[in-house]
Image (cartoon, rainbow, N blue to C red):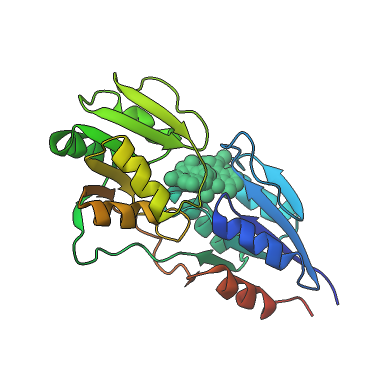
Amino acid sequence: MASTRVLLLGGTTEGRALARDLVTLPGVELTSSLAGRVRHPEALPGEVRVGGFGGVNGLMAHLFAEKVDLVIDATHPFAAEMTHNATKASEIVGVPLVRVDRPAWKPRAGDRWHETDTVAEAARLADSIGTRLFVTTGRQEAQAFAGVRAWCLLRSVDPPEPPLPARHEILLARGPFVVPEEIALMADRRIDCLVTKNSGGGATVAKMSAARELGLPVVIVRRPPLPPGLQCVPDPEGAVDWVARRLVP
Ligand code: NAP
């Protein structure tokens, strides 16, 4: 059997799970791609490349040069630029692409959601609702909170860079998180409002359950739209099936 060269755009829980599954699939030659944002990414099986491709043109050149047969976009729901570039480049080069799009979280009975379209809007709204914010929108956008009056607990994998809120605490942590510890953390820091992106998935959902149990308002950023016509599967298993059906004979 000839080998099928798969480029996996990752940086997520799904990307790591897929890498583990795809390296065991006979006939697959896997390369995972990471943006290089996290200082110490978790080890991945298979080949790994790090850093941007250089926009749509750079990705097209990479697909040609590396003779990529299939592309899987398992990037985060808020990594809209990478998803857009992958869609365009795959379409032009004619390489099949699938996106692993984990379902978004949905409000449940008892939830007090306030939805926004951007992190900047979320920061302003949360500052008008709470005085002690639990900010989980990620290191890259922590600066959106620089001007808030509220005290902020900023949680991210790597330290956020200034400017940061005048009064804050930084908590470095990587999911998955569990509900009792999230409740204990929020109670201990006297959090009165949670700020999050609608990332979906299981690794960071515990904070949503904790906020519900504590009766706290949640300011939640809606996902950016996906490119029209993009083929999606909801989980890594769906992507493994998709690859298995397209192996080069
Ligand atoms: P983004 O805004 O969509 O992408 C900006 C640029 O970063 C892309 O145009 C591309 O550069 C490069 N890039 C992004 N993902 C890449 C990948 N997997 N491999 C190679 N280059 C990549 O992305 P982002 O929101 O900064 O996310 C960066 C990474 O962090 C992604 O892997 C994503 O899955 C992960 N992540 C993001 C979030 C979030 O909230 N945004 C949360 C958790 C994890 P070029 O144009 O030069 O190719």
On-image quarter of the N terminus: bottom right
On-image quarter of the C terminus: bottom right
Residue that extends furthest to the right in the rendered view of this protein: 1
Residue at 32%, 53% in the rendered image: 210
**Above or below for 211 versus 171:** below
Count of labels in the image: 0
**Above or below for 173 versus 181:** above
Measured as percent of width and height from the top left, residue 149 is found at 20, 24
Q: Nearer the viewer, residue 77 or 165?
A: 165
**Above or below for 99 versus 172:** below
Residue that extends furthest to the left in the rendered view of this protein: 128
Measured as percent of width and height from the top left, residue 2 is found at 84, 73
Left or right placement of residue 171 versus residue 196 in this view? right
Measured as percent of width and height from the top left, residue 6 is found at 70, 63
Measured as percent of width and height from the top left, residue 142 is found at 37, 31
The answer to which quarter of the image holds residue 132 is top left
Residue at 76%, 64% in the rendered image: 23
The answer to which quarter of the image holds residue 49 is top right
Residue at 52%, 54% in the rendered image: 75
Q: Is residue 112 visible?
A: yes
Q: Nearer the viewer, residue 207 or 213?
A: 213
Residue at 35%, 27% in the rendered image: 143
Q: Is residue 89 visible?
A: no
The answer to which quarter of the image holds residue 130 is top left
